[in-house]
Image (cartoon, helix red, strand yellow):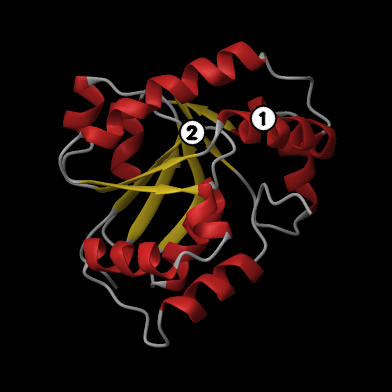
Amino acid sequence: MHKIKCFIISQPKAGTYLCANILKELGFYFHNNHFSEKHFAIYPPVGSPELAVKLQHPHRARVRHVLQQSLPRIKSGQVGVGHLIYKHDTEKRLRKFYKIVLTRDKKDILASMERWTKFSKRPPANLNAVLDTADRILPWISRQGVFHMTFNDMKNMNLDKINKLQSFLRIYHSLGSETLIKRALAEPSITKVI
């Protein structure tokens, strides 16, 4: 088990769970917990009958705990995810985490959001709010101790970026970056829309 813990800070629809799959390939454990400022959500495993219900009605997956109370759930060797906008207090709370920030082009976020809404059967999201959240996540990129990666880096198998991610984490996949990303892409995830 790894001695470090990771947190994926992602823009909406920027590959949150694909990145979690990459970290799982590197030996991290992911509990399908999605963190926010006021609550965290616990999603059932992929393939379970309860997952579709909780994806359509996310309030059924939520536990009311502010971030400060919920972050201790993430132990060494584990990873948490969330769309956390940049705030100095949040940065302080995440100081002991290896932070990975995921971004995606806005037009691709909107197109993915449309596909996701159809797939999950949720009511349409407020797209202005989604894009505002995406903008407010961007300041994380310039912070010290943060690794920035894009959705396209993962989806298009940018091996140089995956090598740099492994260097950042000081953990290396025994079969190399190409095998690592291929396995991560092939794995199911909570929000994967085919």
Q: Residue at x 67, y 28 (%)?
A: 110
Nearer-the-camera pick, 60 or 17: 17
Indicate the quadrant containing the N terminus: top left, top right, bottom left or bottom right.
bottom left
Indicate the quadrant containing the C terminus: top left, top right, bottom left or bottom right.
bottom right
Nearer-the-camera pick, 26 or 77: 26
| Residue 135 x %, y % | 44, 21
| Residue 190 x %, y % | 65, 50
Asked whether, in this view, residue 133 is left or right of residue 93, the answer is right
Task: Tell me: residue 100, above or below residue 34.
Answer: below
Q: Residue at x 46, y 66 (%)?
A: 24
Task: Tell me: residue 179, above or below residue 141.
Answer: below
Tag 1, which secondary structure?
A: helix
Which residue matches tag 2? 11
Any mark on residue 127, and which?
none
Tag 2, which secondary structure?
A: loop
Nearer-the-camera pick, 125 or 148: 148
Amino acid type, label 2: Gln
Which residue matches tag 1? 58
Real-space CA distance between mark 1 and mark 2, rounded to the nearest whole angstrom: 18 Å
Residue 54 seen in the current view:
yes
Q: Residue at x 49, y 33 (%)?
A: 11
Q: Nearer the viewer, mark 1 or mark 2?
A: 2
Q: Residue at x 26, y 59 (%)?
A: 76
